[in-house]
Image (cartoon, rainbow, N blue to C red):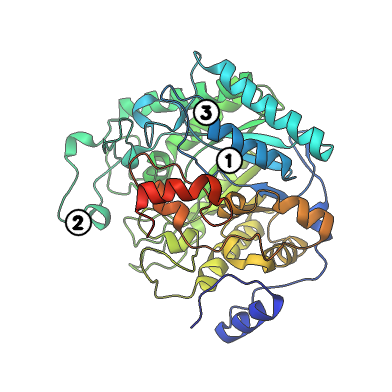
Amino acid sequence: MVRKVYISKEEFDVQNSQLGADLPYTDDISVLKEPFSISGKTVANRLVCQAMEGCDGTPEGSPDILTKRRYRRFAEGGAGLIWFEATAVLKEGRANPNQLYITKDNLDDFKRQVDEIKETAFKTNGYEPLVIMQATHSGRYSKPDGIPAPLIAYNNPIFEKENPIPKENIVSDEYLDRVGEALVNGAVLAEKAGFDGVDIKCCHRYLNCELLSAFEREGRYGGSLENRTRLLRESIKGAIKSCSDDFIVSSRLNIYDGFPYPYGFGVSKNGGPEFDSSEPEWLVKKLYGYGVRILNITMGNPYFNPHVNRPFAHGGYMPDEHPLEGVKRVLEGTAELKRLVPEMALICSAVSYLGTAAPNVVAAYINDGGFDFAGFGRTIFAYPDFAKDIINKGYMDKNKICLCCSKCTEIMRTKGGMPGCVIRDKDVYMPIYKRQCGGK
C-alpha cells in the first residue's frame, strides 16, 4: 500500500476509506482561529509548535545561532502556542553536548531568546504566542559529553536485549529526589526568563516517563501507581507552589508506550500492547486537582518505535501498520482521554503525516470535543509558517508540507548532528545532512 504524505483531499479520502481508518474531516476549519484561555492567559489560536529539539545550543547550554534562527521562524509563523524544546535542568541529564540547559548563569540568554520570540511574533502577526519551556532529564538517553551515559529507572530487556545496562546506572531514590528539586528549580528559572509556563517533561522514555512503567522497581519511585508517578506529581506540585499563580505548569505526557506490561505505561496488563486508559486517566485527574489546566499528549518512543508517535512515509524500518493507523491511534487515544477528563485542555500530536489534510482532520476533532489544540512537530522544521497559512488562507500549501522522510531524525541520531528540514530548508540543512549522514 502506498505510504506518502497527503497533498490533496482526494488522496486522503482514498487511503482513509481503504484502510477503514474513519478519521473525521471537515471543510470548516474556523475553530483553529479561535482563542483559548489558560490560567488567565489567552492563546491567540489553536495551533501549536511542538517541542522540536535542534541540538544546536552552546556548550554551556544557551541558545546559539541556529537556535535563534529557528525560533525567529517559528515566531513569524503565527502559532498561538510555542512549546519550547527540551531544556535540561541537570548537566548529566543532557541528551547531547549542545542540548539547551538553563542555569542561573545563562538566565539572561534565555531572557533574550523569549523576548525575541515575543517581539518578532507581535511585529509580524500582531499578537504574542504563549511560550512554554520543556524542562527535562534525558535519563536512559543522557549523553552530555557525546558518549552514552545512561541513567535509568530500571533495566528493560526490550531495549537492552543481550547488553543490559550496568545496575549501577540505575538511579537511587535519593538521586530522583534531587532530580525533582532540579525540575522545580528549572520552572522557577523559566518564569524568571519570561516563559509563560513550564512543561515537566514526561514522555518518549526519558527519565520521568520511564518511571511511569517502573512496575518492578523497589522503593518510593516504583511498584504502585502512586510511586511510579511520584517524580512527575511532586515536581508539578513543587513548580505550582514555587511559581506565580498565572504561570502555566504542564507536561508533555506519554499516555501509551506501546510496550507490553510490565515495560509499558498505558497498556493492558493481559500481556498485549493494547491501549488501556485507566492509569493515564487517574494521573490526569490527579494533575488537574493540583492545578494543571493543559497537557500535551503523545505516545511511543522515538528511539525504539517511532512509527507510534510520529508516523512516517520513510524511515529506518517498515512498520507492520500503515502510518494512517498510527495517526488514528494517537488522535483517538487523546480523544478518549478528553472524554474521560473533559475539564483538562489537551494538545494532540502525530499529525504531520496528514499533510494538507491535517487542519481539516484536527478541526473536526476539536469541533467534536476530542481535544483543544493541534500540535505540529516535524512540520514546523519544514513549514514554520504553517499556522499563518491555515489562519489567513484556510489551507496548507502542498509545496511546503513535511514529507515525513525522516532525514531530520537521521541527522539527530548522529554525533554532533543539528536537525532541520533537508528538503524545505536545504540551504542550511542539506550541507549538515551530507556531512553527518553521507548524503544518502
Q: Position of residue 82 (x, y in %)?
A: 65, 40
Residue tagged by mark 3? 64
Q: Amino acid at mark 1?
A: Leu
**Image quadrant of residue 440?**
bottom left
In front of the other: label 3 or label 2?
3
Out of 104 and 40, give the one closest to the viewer.
Answer: 104
Q: At x 64% / y 21%, what residue is drawn?
A: 112
Point out the tag, 1 or 2, that comes first from the N-terminus: 2
Q: CA distance from mark 1 to mark 2?
A: 34 Å
Q: Amino acid at mark 2?
A: Lys
Point out the tag, 3 or 2, that comes first from the N-terminus: 3
Q: Does residue 227 appear left or right of residue 193 in this picture?
A: left
Q: CA distance from mark 3 to mark 1?
A: 34 Å
Q: Amino acid at mark 3?
A: Asp
Secondary element under disc 2, as helix, strand or loop, is loop
Q: Does residue 96 appear left or right of residue 107 in this picture?
A: left
Q: Position of residue 244 (x, y in %)?
A: 67, 21
Q: Position of residue 354 (x, y in %)?
A: 61, 67
Circles 3 and 2, Cβ within 8 Å, touching? The answer is no
